[in-house]
Amino acid sequence: MVVPQLVQILRTLVTTGYSTEHSISGVSDPFLQVQILRLLRILGRNHEESSETMNDLLAQVATNTDTSRNAGNAVLLETVLTIMAIHSAAGLRVLAVNILGRFLLNNDKNIRYVALTSLLQLVQSDHSAVQRHRSTVVECLQETDASLSRRALELSLALVNSSNVRAMMQELQAFLESCPPDLRADCASGILLAAERFAPSKRWHIDTILHVLTTAGAHVRDDAVANLTQLIGEAEELHTYSVRRLYSALAEDISQQPLVQVAAWCIGEYGDLLLEGNCEETEPFQVEEEDVLALLEKVLQSHMSLPATRGYAITALMKLSTRLRGDNNRIRQVVSIYGSCVDLELQQRAVEYNTLFQKYDHMRAAILEKMPLVERGDPHVKEGGKEKQTEAQPLEVTAPAPTEPQATKLLDLLDLLGDTSEPLSSGHAQHLPPQTPSPGEALIHLLDLPCTPPPPAPIPSVRVFEREGLQLDLSFMRPLETPALLLVTATTTNSSKEDVTHFVCQAAVPKSFQLQLQAPSGNTIPAQGGLPITQVFRILNPNQAPLRLKLRLTYNHSGQPVQEIFEVDNLPVETWQ
């Protein structure tokens, strides 16, 4: 066993003084000491007995080595690295971290850099010991050397936890305002991640993100906008506070694009709260409808606005058409201008919104309802929570496109039934498996052979609604090639003496299902048994769970608007088994 021999050699070098021919700056043969320490580090790694033999010697080297010279600092650094690599005692590890903490106070930049790098490697295994030097690490943020300030930033972010998050965020936000441009993106990203992980409250979290967006909006991560809108949406009690804070920030500066996007989204969703009055938690100020519209128009016209930002602004204007009490002519004029915009995305939005104003104005309020909350998966949720969540499944909603070919264009807009908690897609509707014939059926059809497969047993139809001569019947079919797919045909007839106009049928299913509504055949049902309206629901049920439907019917009958919401849970078992 060579470890005792190496320990004895190193102890002799440390305790018996030094010879003139081998000493450097008063340290006895530092090159030999360094080599012995490196060899001990290799031999003691994952070997508890050898580590115990070294502990006393390493403590002796750490306390007796002269730190006034670089040679002594080199020996100390190797000692620290050896202590951290072997099975050393807890007190010895704390001593090693304290040595690195003293290195941070050294005038030599190289030594400070080595200390920061070493502490960064130790922060996970000896977090509490490194925490004792937090104030010194934070002071290193002000280093003029870029490599030092970057290492200090990385170590500062690693030291953030739930007990010091408020103090550390203040220091990091102050550094963000004055840090070099090449560090701003890393600093902003680190602050957002730490705030998301350790936020003590939702309001503090919102304020922190807003400060980052205001200070360094151009340097934040791409998902910062989505995360903040999700956070604001979840904090219902802070909607008024958030929209007023964002409105004030937007009025002061429209150059920070992520900030402008979040502000436009928030104003569009909660513009009515912005006008209702003052919020106790913000400075009082009065906002008029014209001021809000003028600010969004300013964003649209600004040369600093990105195409995506203009998309947020024009959508916010459209949402305000259902939230403001004034005339919508100004909004319609602004939207119509962008119908010929050179940016295709913005042009498509404007054309869709113009179509909504002109042809589907009766649906505009429902289409532009407040967006429901988007559920984010939490990897830390316990199994019991998952089971509980499954028992009370919210309904997933999708809505029909009114007519073709406008149906495809308007799918982006139809986020209806805002009273549901299930996430709604802001893009196109979900694509279900197409009804393509299987190879066997295609071959049979091609050869025109009489041996066709037996047809499935018919599923009985169900009448789910009847009122004042208006009836709604559901018929069902399950394609053989896709057993999990159910095709539901909703047929609405009118036997009354008055026409039914502006008829819209909307549907919702539990979130374990996927639902797609095809375009209805019309929106007017003539009186006394005229041509009925038909509409197809495509429901994908991969788990073969019992099917429940929630329907909402809106229409005008005898000059009166009618809205009916009801649940259908008595569907035939053939629809899902």
Image: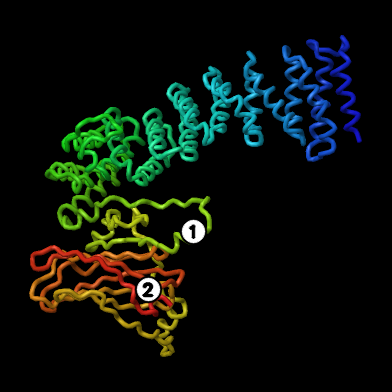
Q: Amino acid at mark 1?
A: Lys
Q: Secondary structure at mark 2?
A: strand
Q: Is residue 166 above or below residue 420?
A: above
For mark 1, what is the residue? 386
The residue at 23%/39% (across/down) is 274
Viewer-proximal residue among 272 and 490: 272
Q: Is residue 39 visible?
A: no
On screen, residue 434 versus residue 491, left or right, reads: right
Q: Is residue 383 visible?
A: yes
User: Which numbered disc, 1 or 2, marks the residue that appears first in the sequence?
Assistant: 1
Viewer-proximal residue among 1 and 539: 1
Where residue 234 sits in the image (x, y, percent)?
37, 46
Where residue 188 sits in the image (x, y, percent)?
46, 32
Quarter of the image with the C terminus is bottom left
On screen, residue 18 versus residue 257, left or right, reads: right
On screen, residue 544 versus residue 84, left or right, reads: left
Q: CA distance from mark 1 to mark 2?
A: 27 Å
Query: Which is closer to the viewer, label 1 or label 2?
Result: 1
Where residue 16 sits in the image (x, y, percent)?
89, 15
The residue at 53%/33% (across/down) is 160
For mark 2, what is the residue? 486
- Answer with the quarter of the image where residue 358 lies: bottom left
Q: Residues within 10 Å of mark 1 (few under 14, many from 20)?
A: few
Task: Name the disc covering residue 304, or none.
Answer: none
Viewer-proximal residue among 78 and 468: 468
Q: Is residue 492 above or below residue 559?
A: below
Q: Amino acid at mark 2?
A: Leu
Q: Secondary structure at mark 1?
A: helix
The residue at 38%/51% (across/down) is 374
